[in-house]
Amino acid sequence: MISTSKLTLATALALGAVTLPAQAQDNALSFSLTGGAQISPKYFGSSEYRVGPSGAFGFTGLRFGAAQLGDPEGPAQFAPGAGLRGAFRFIPKRKGESELAGMEDVKTSVELGIGAHYTQEFWQVFGDIRYGVIGHKAIAGEIGANLIWRDPSGLVLHGGPRAEFGNSRFNRTYFGVTPAEAADPGNTLTPYTLSGGFHSVGLEIGAYQPLNADWGITAALRYDRLRGAAARSPIVQQGSRNQFGAEIGLTRHFNLRF
């Protein structure tokens, strides 16, 4: 979720980059924003699905004076090389109702972080780590790999395995059941606690179609299977270990000079 103040700041920087003299525009910031729609499980371990908004933030590079991080010139999507990238995830609120009656609500969470990737012409490996700056205040992340196919038109198809993990606070938030929650008269779930670690493995297939130098369309299909202690959670046992998702969005690339 991008706040109005952050969007206003980004707009001001963009306007400043247009009006400043060329010799003053030595500093650069390159990133991308994606907004769209997705279908996903109502919560981790749910067998029911919801349609809602989706979003992503991609950091490409920053140059400020003599310091440089990543590639501030903003390479193309899946450009070969090694570098850093932004990591973002929005997790909707989980309400303590229906099959989760008696469970406390879990607040909406926004995770921000950083990732690293190594990309070649036909393959890629990556890892991301994120922190819940809003909501769960826990650490989560993902590692994965892609096989890549590039069309002369600019279309990029990718697909490969994924594995997601969380620290103990994250896993207890989404898969645990406290004694107080289990004691609620409306709750049929038994107390359950777990530690941190990998909680799912899966596969993602995606596509990116550039429309021009600044805009593109992003789409993905994903399957995850909850594993280990997360799969044994009473929340998952009354739902499903199999988690499916799909999303489509419009991506805007920004190359700011200031």
Image (tube, rainbow, N blue to C red):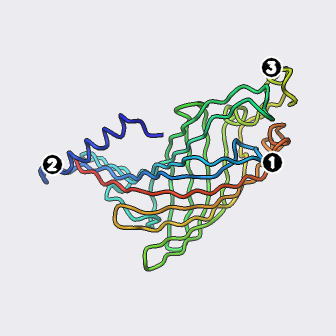
What is the crowding at mark 3: few (fewer than 14 residues within 10 Å), some, or many (at least 20)?
few
In the rendered view, would you say 258 is above or below 158? above
Q: Is residue 170 left or right of residue 67?
A: right
* Residue drawn at x 68%, y 61% as measured from the top left: 203
- Of residue 166 and residue 250, the one placed in the foreground of this image is 250
Q: Is residue 22 left or right of residue 170?
A: left
- On the image, the x and y values in percent for residue 198 come to 71, 46
Q: Mark 2: which secondary structure?
A: helix
Amino acid type at circle 3 is Ala
Q: Which residue is mark 3?
A: 180
- On the image, the x and y values in percent for residue 168 come to 70, 34
Mark 3 to mark 1: distance in Å? 24 Å
Q: Which residue is mark 1?
A: 240
Disc ID at residue 91: none
Q: Which residue is mark 2?
A: 19
In the rendered view, would you say 97 is above or below 51? above
**Whether label 1 touches label 2, CB < 8 Å:** no
Q: Mark 3: which secondary structure?
A: helix
Q: Mark 1: which secondary structure?
A: loop
Q: Quadrant of residue 191?
A: top right
In the rendered view, would you say 179 is above or below 231? above
Q: State which tag comes first along the sequence, 3 or 1.
A: 3
